[in-house]
Image (cartoon, rainbow, N blue to C red):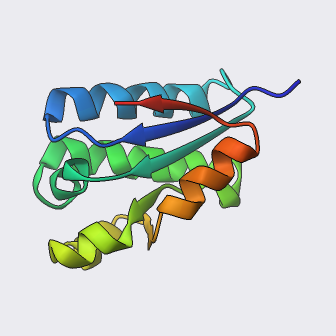
């Protein structure tokens, strides 16, 4: 049985976001899980555009995801980032910007366990 996790980072609180990002990064970097998928959703996306520590950790996650599996690149919600005019800032970090409702549902259907921060 594989151990796959879907880390959904949605909080607007930078400390909570950084905690979730730290877990996701370490799970990727140290092989704690077979696959780790990260989705930014909601207020966390604005922190990607404005908060230096969050942006720095996002870069580390992008690199760890690339090293683990190119299909595991982090994703952010296009609907929300378009609404908040942050799509370009988020994409500049190497994060895919796409609609995530179906994506999240598909990962759960595929056996990924959601962990929400």
**Near-viewer residue (69 or 15):** 15
Q: Going 36% across and 73% down the picture, which residue do you hit?
A: 78
Image quadrant assignment for residue 8: top left
**Residue 5 horizontal side relative to residue 74, left or right:** right
Which image quarter is the C terminus in? top left
Name the foreground residue: 68 vs 9: 9
Residue for point 75% across, 37% down: 111
Residue 9 relative to residue 16: left or right:
right
| Left or right of 34 in this view: 24 | left
Residue 113: which quarter of the image? Answer: top right
Residue 14 rendering spot, x and y as whole percentages: 15, 35
The quarter of the rendered structure image containing the N terminus is: top right
Please name whichever residue, 13 or 64, is drawn nearer the observer in this view of the structure: 13
Residue 92 visible, this orientation: no
Q: Position of residue 76 (x, y in %)?
A: 39, 61
Q: Can residue 84 be seen by looking at this rendering?
A: yes
- Give the residue displayed 48% in from the left and 62% down from the top: 100
In this view of the protein, which residue sits in the foreground, 111 or 95?
A: 111
Image label count? 0
Relative height, residue 88 to residue 74 (above, below):
below
Return the x and y of residue 101 as percentages of the image width and height.
49, 60
Q: Is residue 30 above or below residue 55?
A: above
């Amino acid at each position: 049985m594989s151990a796959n996790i879907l880390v959904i980072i949605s909080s607007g609180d930078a400390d909570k976001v950084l905690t979730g990002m730290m877990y996701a990064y370490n799970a990727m970097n140290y092989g704690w899980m077979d696959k780790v998928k990260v989705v930014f959703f909601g207020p966390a996306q604005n922190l990607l555009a404005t908060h230096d520590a969050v942006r720095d950790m996002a870069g580390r996650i992008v690199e760890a995801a690339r090293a683990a599996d190119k299909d595991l690149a982090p994703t952010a919600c296009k609907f929300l980032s378009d609404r908040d005019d942050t799509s370009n800032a988020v994409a500049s970090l190497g994060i895919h910007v796409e609609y995530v409702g179906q994506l999240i549902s598909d990962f759960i259907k595929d056996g990924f366990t959601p962990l929400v921060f």
